[in-house]
């Protein structure tokens, strides 16, 4: 198991309201060590969870639509796999491009701030002054803070990025975000199809293939929904039930459409 970062320890201490653990996460040594490692709060958990949710919901909707139309297991597998790879790829590319665009925007803004500091330091220093005046600094203390921050270009730019533009630079790779989304989409999204593959080798499963798929998918809905707590920090039970209801509603709609249009097949 990977060693927890200082921020993760601080979060865990907060969740359990452990004062002693909070103190340990905020010692001078812990803070200095984390700073030297350039600790980042980025994570791929959200990409995995949301890719998994989207994969399971959309694939099960396809399965339900085909089941409603009373089509064969072959059709379920063909359409299900087509959805898995095409929709999964589309979602992964969308996540990659969105993340890449966000990073490029942040980098462009950083270059702009660096250029403004180089060509008009007085104006940028005044911005720092106004930022810290709003934080409650006045008189000599305010001027001292401004002097300290503007004496280091790196700190100066970082302060402008965070305090003026509200932009935080992370170390998360857009390519990895897209890959995690695609993999989770495929892995969890394939669950509704598993009973249909098994039905080719078992007559018993063939007779209950759609109910079997419902059970497996609903279990996946609940557990993936519960996993959202790592991102949202909400109650795991409510989060699981919420995803279960959303996935179930999508399946009912798809089944109804398939049933109403089965005469066209």
Image (cartoon, rainbow, N blue to C red):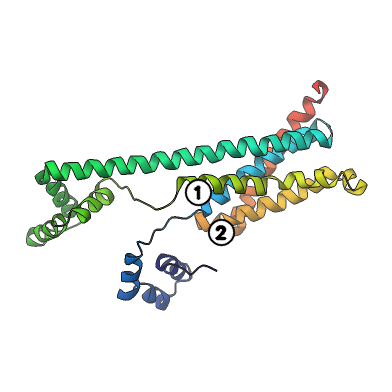
Q: Position of residue 103 (x, y in %)?
A: 37, 43
Residue at screen point 40% across, 68% down: 6
Q: Secondary structure at mark 2?
A: loop
Quadrant in the picture for the N terminus: bottom right
Residue at screen point 37% across, 62% down: 39
Which of the two labelled residues, at mark 2 and mark 1, occupies the earlier sequence position?
A: 1
What residue is disc 1 on? Answer: 176
How far apart are labels 2 and 1 at the CA level? Answer: 28 Å
Residue at screen point 59% across, 44% down: 182
Q: Position of residue 117 (x, y in %)?
A: 15, 45
Q: Nearer the viewer, residue 137 or 11?
A: 11
Quadrant in the picture for the C terminus: top right
Q: Is residue 255 left or right of residue 106?
A: right
Q: Is residue 79 left or right of residue 54?
A: right
> Which residue reaches farthest bottom?
20
User: Mark 2, residues whose alpha carbon is within 10 Å: few (<14), some, or many (≥20)?
Assistant: few
Q: Nearer the viewer, residue 230 or 151?
A: 151
Q: Is residue 52 left or right of residue 109?
A: right
Tag of residue 8: none
Image quadrant where residue 13 sits:
bottom left
Q: Position of residue 113 (x, y in %)?
A: 22, 44
Tag of residue 235: 2
Q: Is residue 236 above or below residue 78?
A: below
């Amino acid at each position: 198991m990977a060693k927890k970062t200082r921020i993760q320890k601080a979060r865990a201490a907060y969740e359990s309201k452990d004062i002693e653990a909070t103190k340990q996460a905020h010692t001078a040594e812990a803070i200095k060590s984390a700073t030297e490692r350039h600790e980042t709060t980025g994570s791929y958990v959200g990409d995995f969870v949301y890719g998994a949710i989207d994969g399971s919901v959309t694939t099960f909707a396809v399965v339900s639509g085909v089941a409603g139309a009373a089509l064969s297991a072959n059709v379920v597998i063909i359409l299900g796999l087509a959805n898995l790879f095409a929709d999964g790829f589309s979602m992964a590319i969308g996540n990659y491009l969105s993340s890449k665009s966000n990073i490029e925007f942040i980098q462009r803004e950083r270059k702009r701030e660096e250029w403004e500091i180089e060509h008009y330091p007085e104006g940028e220093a005044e911005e720092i002054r106004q930022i810290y005046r709003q934080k409650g600094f006045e008189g000599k203390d305010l001027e001292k803070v401004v002097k300290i921050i503007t004496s280091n270009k790196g700190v100066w730019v970082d302060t402008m990025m965070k305090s003026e533009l509200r932009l935080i630079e992370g170390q998360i790779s857009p390519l990895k975000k897209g890959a995690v989304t695609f993999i989770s989409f495929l892995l969890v999204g394939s669950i509704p199809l598993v009973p249909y593959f098994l039905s080719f080798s078992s007559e018993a499963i063939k007779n209950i293939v759609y109910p079997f798929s419902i059970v497996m998918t609903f279990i996946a809905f609940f557990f993936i929904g519960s996993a959202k707590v790592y991102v949202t920090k909400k109650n795991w039970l409510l989060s699981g039930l919420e995803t279960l209801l959303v996935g179930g509603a999508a399946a009912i709609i798809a089944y109804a459409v398939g049933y109403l249009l089965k005469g066209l097949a």
